[in-house]
Image (tube, rainbow, N blue to C red):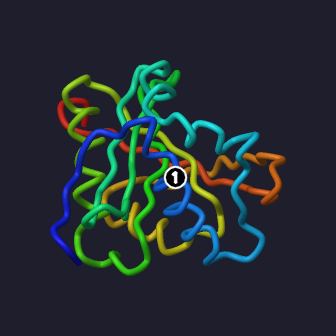
Amino acid sequence: MAELSIRLAKDSDAEGLVDLIEGCFNEYEGCVLDPEGIDKPLYAIRSWVEAEGGEFWVAEDGSRIVGSIGWVKDAGGMELVKLYVNKKCRRQGLATRLLRLVEQAAEERGLEINFWSDTRFIEAHNFYTVHGYEKLTETRQLNDPSRTTEYHFKRVVGRMA
């Protein structure tokens, strides 16, 4: 990997974010982007997270986006969104670095972290449980082109723990 940098996302990161997430989705049969539906925020990510009261970061390896993560406010505190890492950049600590950004934001605000993850993303679920996230029994169907079913995860961090 070239020198890795993490920065706040811009709306102009759309092409790089789509490439990153589409690459991750391609690892799973039937998993596709839904640009007119649930993936529409990718095309103006900063505007979307700011409107939702959150933050979003991208990791770059040179000029290519190789990682992403963000959070938005939800009824239970904050929802972690779009943690993705390019396959060639995994198992090098990048996902943990990105996750820490959201956890730090949660701790500073005294909020719990909730999120949903596609049932197909087993490797990601292992990552989350190693980092103290609890997989709840609740699931939801998205009725999207990928026919997504998601597991609910939760973690209370910092001063709320």
Q: Nearer the viewer, residue 26 or 18?
A: 18
Quarter of the image where the C terminus is located? top left
Task: Tell me if 105 is positioned left or right of 30 in this view.
Answer: left
Q: Residue 128, relative to residue 88: is it above or below?
A: above
* Above or below, 42 relative to 108: below
Write down the residue under mark 1.
15
Nearer to me, 72 or 66: 66
Q: Residue at x 48, y 53 (%)?
A: 17
Q: The disc labelled 1 sits on which kind of residue?
A: Glu
Q: Nearer the viewer, residue 17 or 38?
A: 17
Q: Is residue 138 left or right of residue 107?
A: right
Residue 159 location (% of width, % of height)? 18, 31
The answer to which of 159 and 65 lies nearer the viewer is 65
Residue at left offset 43%, top offset 31%: 46
Q: Is residue 14 left or right of residue 128?
A: right
Q: Residue at x 65, y 64 (%)?
A: 119
Quarter of the rendering occupied by the N terminus: bottom left
Report whether 120 appears left or right of 125: right
Q: Residues within 10 Å of mark 1 (few under 14, many from 20)?
A: few
Q: How many marks?
A: 1
Whether residue 44 is situated above or below residue 20 in the rendered picture? above
**In what element is the residue under mark 1?**
helix
Question: In the image, residue 123 lies at what x, y percent?
Answer: 49, 74
Residue 19 position in % (x across, y down): 53, 62
Q: Position of residue 156 (x, y in %)?
A: 33, 39
